[in-house]
Amino acid sequence: MNSRMLTRHTITRVLPAALLTLGLCFALAACGESRPKPKAPPPPPPTPAATAAPAPKMESVDINTYLQAQKADKRVQFPQEKAPGDDLVAKSVIDLASALAKGDAKAFGGLLTGEAKDVLEQLQSGGQWDDSTSKIEAVRVVEVAAPGARPATFTVTLAVQEPGNAYVLRFGGTLSGEKYLFNGQPVGRATHPRANQFDDGRFD
């Protein structure tokens, strides 16, 4: 990982829990750092066209049904108002949150992309995974951005509750065959005493 990125993403953010490092490392592995490209000239103005009718909004799935069906850990909190409209997205998010809450590295790793899985293995070998997940009191789904049915990609933000402190981790899911694989995504630096205080969607 680029040392400048490591400094920018870790030294300026003071949070307990090595699990934050997990999220940051996932994001660093996924994003990398590229040199800025020259700006292209602006495109010509679009030709006026008739406004298309908005697509009908999908109904949200019944989260309680899926929490039971996926045998989610009791520490997983998934408010119905955050539920997506796609069943596979819902199942994948529940599985991700549940594996994190349990500290089940094998199950969690099975939901990750190759790069993110490499980071997880490093954290396991250093003892950071066990140290951080042992402190988890709850994992709360505070945002799911998943447009339409079977979206090719979507993002989910999880609020991780530790004793007296909560912070957020964000993951991007990419459809791979019949399941979603996740990697880390950058997210804000806010902390709160309780995970449900992130329900307003403010993470900075």
Image (cartoon, helix red, strand yellow):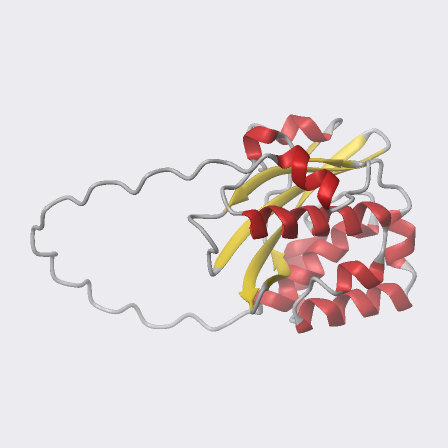
Pinpoint residue 96: horizontal percent, then vertical percent.
71, 52
Q: Quadrant of residue 203?
A: top right
Q: Is residue 114 visible?
A: yes
The residue lying at 82 percent from left, 69 percent from top is: 121
Which of the image's four quarters has the C terminus? top right
The quadrant of the rendering that contains the N terminus is bottom right
Residue 4 percent location from the top left of the image = 63, 65
Horizontal and vertical percent position of residue 179: 61, 62
Query: Of residues 107 and 27, which is closer to you in this image?
Result: 107
Q: Is residue 173 left or right of residue 16?
A: left
Of residues 204 and 60, the one drawn nearer to the viewer in this rendering = 60
Residue 202 shows in the view: no
* Residue 47 horizontal side relative to residue 53, left or right: left
Q: Residue furthest left?
A: 48
Rendered position, 151 above or below 159: below
Q: Image height check: is 22 above or below 14? A: below
Q: In front: 67, or 32?
A: 67
Number of marks present in the image shown = 0
Residue, x 74% and y 65% (percent of image)? 110
Residue 45 left/right relative to 74: left
The residue that appears at 64% across and 49% down in the rendered structure is: 91
Of 188 and 175, nearer the camera is 175
